[in-house]
Image (cartoon, rainbow, N blue to C red):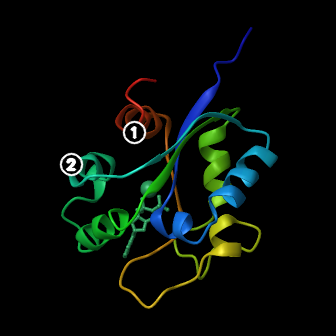
């Protein structure tokens, strides 16, 4: 019996692209054994981010988060593999880069910047439902 392969939506956020960490983040995804299905440098729009961050609309950090995500290009990635949704969240580490465990992307490469926004280098879908929704937003052709 073939187990259906899982896919997730990963973003290297504008801080990661600007700091030249796209390659290092892709390296970690590939080193873990996940397959790259799509990789594209994209510019977000307010409309796209409102869909992407629908669960956060109205929260105090929503507008600063959107402004940050519009501050430069993002590298949008679809990766595939067994339990890749959970696996990439584990590679990324905790939301707050200051306390994210060493060994994780956010723990090794992120830190708090003197802004009100959490600049934490990457996004990863948090469930199968989110992954399907987010892949459709960023890569409608898939
Ligand atoms: P994650 O990116 O770990 O899935 P999330 O979905 O809860 O975290 O939040 C999305 C992004 O919003 C997160 O990467 C950084 C920002 N954020 C979350 N909580 C925040 C807070 N309390 N204050 C400021 N920014 C926050
Ligand atoms: Mg999230």
Q: Residue at x 74, y 8 (%)?
A: 1
Quadrant position of residue 116: bottom left
Q: Residue at x 38, y 78 (%)?
A: 117
Q: Residue at x 68, y 47 (%)?
A: 87
> Residue 126 placed where, x, y %?
50, 47
Q: Is residue 121 visible?
A: no
The residue most toward the top is: 1
Q: Residue at x 64, y 49 (%)?
A: 88
Q: Which residue is mark 1?
A: 138
What secondary structure is found at the residue carrying circle 1? Answer: helix
Quadrant position of residue 68: bottom left
> Residue 45 placed where, x, y %?
26, 52
What secondary structure is found at the residue carrying circle 2? Answer: helix
> Residue 85, labelled with which disc?
none
Is 48 in front, or is 92?
48
Rounded to the nearest angstrom, the CA distance separating label 2 from label 1 is 12 Å
In the drawing, does residue 128 fall left or right of residue 63? right
> Residue 132 placed where, x, y %?
43, 31
> Residue 51 placed where, x, y %?
26, 45
Point out the quarter of the image occupied by ligand 2. bottom left
In the drawing, does residue 133 fall left or right of residue 3? left
Q: Which residue is mark 2?
A: 47
């Amino acid at each position: 019996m073939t187990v259906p392969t899982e896919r997730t939506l990963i973003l290297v956020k504008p801080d990661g692209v600007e700091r030249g960490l796209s390659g290092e983040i892709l390296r970690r995804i590939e080193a873990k054994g996940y397959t790259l299905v799509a990789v594209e440098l994209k510019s977000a729009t307010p409309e796209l981010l409102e869909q992407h961050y629908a669960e956060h609309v109205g929260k105090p950090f929503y507008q600063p988060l959107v402004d940050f995500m519009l501050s430069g290009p993002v590298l949008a990635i679809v990766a595939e593999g067994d339990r890749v949704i959970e696996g990439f969240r584990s590679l990324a580490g905790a939301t707050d880069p200051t306390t994210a465990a060493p060994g994780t992307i956010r723990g090794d490469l992120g830190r708090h910047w003197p802004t009100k926004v959490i600049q934490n280098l990457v996004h990863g879908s948090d469930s199968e439902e989110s992954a399907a929704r987010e892949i459709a937003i960023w890569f409608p052709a898939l």
